[in-house]
Amino acid sequence: MASTYRTARKKITEALVKKLQLIDGNHPFNSNMFNNVHGGMVFLDQIQEFPKVCVVPGDETREYQPNEFKWRFLNLDIRVYVEDQEDPQEVLALLMEDIERVIDNNDVLVYDDTVSPHQTTTSLTLESLSTDEGVLEPLGIGEMTLVCRY
């Protein structure tokens, strides 16, 4: 029988995906994701519909504190894929700005509400942003790296 247990890594990824799916083009957002956000890696040749955002959990580290307390740090990569015939880099920049807004507004992210008290992150920190700089036009690919402390 398959286990229904999910790790904190998986739960944090799923919670962030749900928040990013709220990017719908209405104020304050510039872009509409059409719920096209996925937890896990998707390769360019697998994408049928743009824009596409993938949230991929990466390495995790620990910082041990007194009294058996420990901070966990999870690296998350957010891959952003867009297509636009006129200016894919502008479309990409606007979508990445929307994603950054969601990250800033969800620094304390509830990732498990089935326990009391709810399990939350204590910070989501954007470490880096990069794009393909127009090499793949009319496509645009961006990557954002986050560190999640919980």
Image (cartoon, helix red, strand yellow):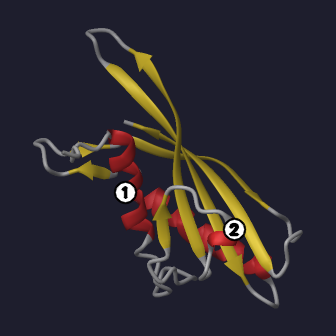
Please indicate, yes or no, whether residue 82 appears anywhere in the rendered image.
Answer: yes
Q: Position of residue 23 (x, y in %)?
A: 46, 77
Q: Position of residue 88 (x, y in %)?
A: 77, 80
Residue underneath mark 2:
44
Q: CA distance from mark 1 to mark 2?
A: 21 Å
Residue underneath mark 1:
14
Residue reaching furthest to the left: 116
Please indicate, yes or no, whether residue 108 appears anywhere in the rendered image.
Answer: no
Judged left or right of residue 63, residue 114 is left
Q: Is residue 58 above or below residue 51?
A: above
Q: Amino acid at mark 2?
A: Leu
- Of residue 29 and residue 91, the one placed in the foreground of this image is 91
Which badge, 1 or 2, is on the more N-terminal residue?
1
Residue reaching furthest to the top: 66
Considering the image in quadrants, where does the C terminus appear? top left
Q: Position of residue 74 (x, y in %)?
A: 48, 37
Q: Residue at x 49, y 76 (%)?
A: 36
- Of residue 136 and residue 5, the one placed in the foreground of this image is 5
Marks 1 and 2: which is nearer the front?
A: 2
| Count of labels in the image | 2
Q: Position of residue 6 (x, y in %)?
A: 28, 44
Q: Amino acid at mark 1?
A: Glu
Q: Residue at x 80, y 90 (%)?
A: 85
Considering the image in quadrants, where does the N terminus appear? top left
Residue reaching furthest to the front: 1
Tell me which corner region of the image, top left, top right, bottom left or bottom right, holds residue 127: top right
Mark 2 crowdedness (10 Å alpha carbons): few <14, some 14-19, many ≥20: few
Residue reaching furthest to the right: 135
